[in-house]
């Protein structure tokens, strides 16, 4: 038999092992960045939900002429929205610590009770018949991403995009 007539097909074991090793090294470089992006995306959902719920609460206070409050928990990033005496679950966040592990919130320049009250004019105050307040809420994700939300006395929330990372 002549060897020149035979067609050699396939890969050697060494070629396959080298290819798998290169793919594994590339995977090790990509996975930490991917995990960080997923965590950042999760926290940005939390950061975007708060202004939406705050706007809803303000709108409810103006349209129904009822007192509306949002009780904020700085340690767990939870909040509860109450219209009159009824809690509104769909515009509250009660399980932030399980959905967004490692995320922390810090409330500055806000009411000592941690509650924001909305007047029938849509203004944010530190209590029923209280003074207008403009708290700053800093949200820190587990991987170090930071968002700063400024709640104006008018009920508008400003996300400082320079600090979002």
Image: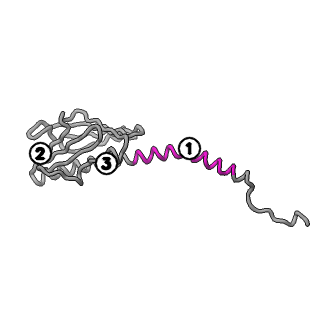
In the rendering, which numbered label is found on residue 48? 3
The mark that comes first in sequence, 1 or 2, is: 1
Residue 164 magenta: no
In the rendering, which numbered label is found on residue 163? none
C-alpha gap between disc 1 and disc 3: 30 Å
Q: Nearer the viewer, mark 1 or mark 3?
A: 1
Does residue 16 appear to the left or right of 36 in the view shown?
Answer: right
Residue visible at 10% across and 41% down in the picture: 128
Question: Residue 152 appears at what percent x and percent y?
Answer: 21, 40
C-alpha gap between disc 1 and disc 2: 52 Å
Does residue 9 appear to the left or right of 165 in the view shown?
Answer: right
Q: Nearer the viewer, mark 1 or mark 2?
A: 1
The mark that comes first in sequence, 1 or 3, is: 1
Residue visible at 14% across and 39% down in the picture: 125
The mark that comes first in sequence, 2 or 3, is: 3
Q: Residues within 10 Å of mark 2 (few under 14, many from 20)?
A: many
Question: Residue 148 appears at what percent x and percent y?
Answer: 31, 38
Q: Which residue is mark 2?
A: 119
Quick one: SS at disc 2? Answer: loop
């Amino acid at each position: 038999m002549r060897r020149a007539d035979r067609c050699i097909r396939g890969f050697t074991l060494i070629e396959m092992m080298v290819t798998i090793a290169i793919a594994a090294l590339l995977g090790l470089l990509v996975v930490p960045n991917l995990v960080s992006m997923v965590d950042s995306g999760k926290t940005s959902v939390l950061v975007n939900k708060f202004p939406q719920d705050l706007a809803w609460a303000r709108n409810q206070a103006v349209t129904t002429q009822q007192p509306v409050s949002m009780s904020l928990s700085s340690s767990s990033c939870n909040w509860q929205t109450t219209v009159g005496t009824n809690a509104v679950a769909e515009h509250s966040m009660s399980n932030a610590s399980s959905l967004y592990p490692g995320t922390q919130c810090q409330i500055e320049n806000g009411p000592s009770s941690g509650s924001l009250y909305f007047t029938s004019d849509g203004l944010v105050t530190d209590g029923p018949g209280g003074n207008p307040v403009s708290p700053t809420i800093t949200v820190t994700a587990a991987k170090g991403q930071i968002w700063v939300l400024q709640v104006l006395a008018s009920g508008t929330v400003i996300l400082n995009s320079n600090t979002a990372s």
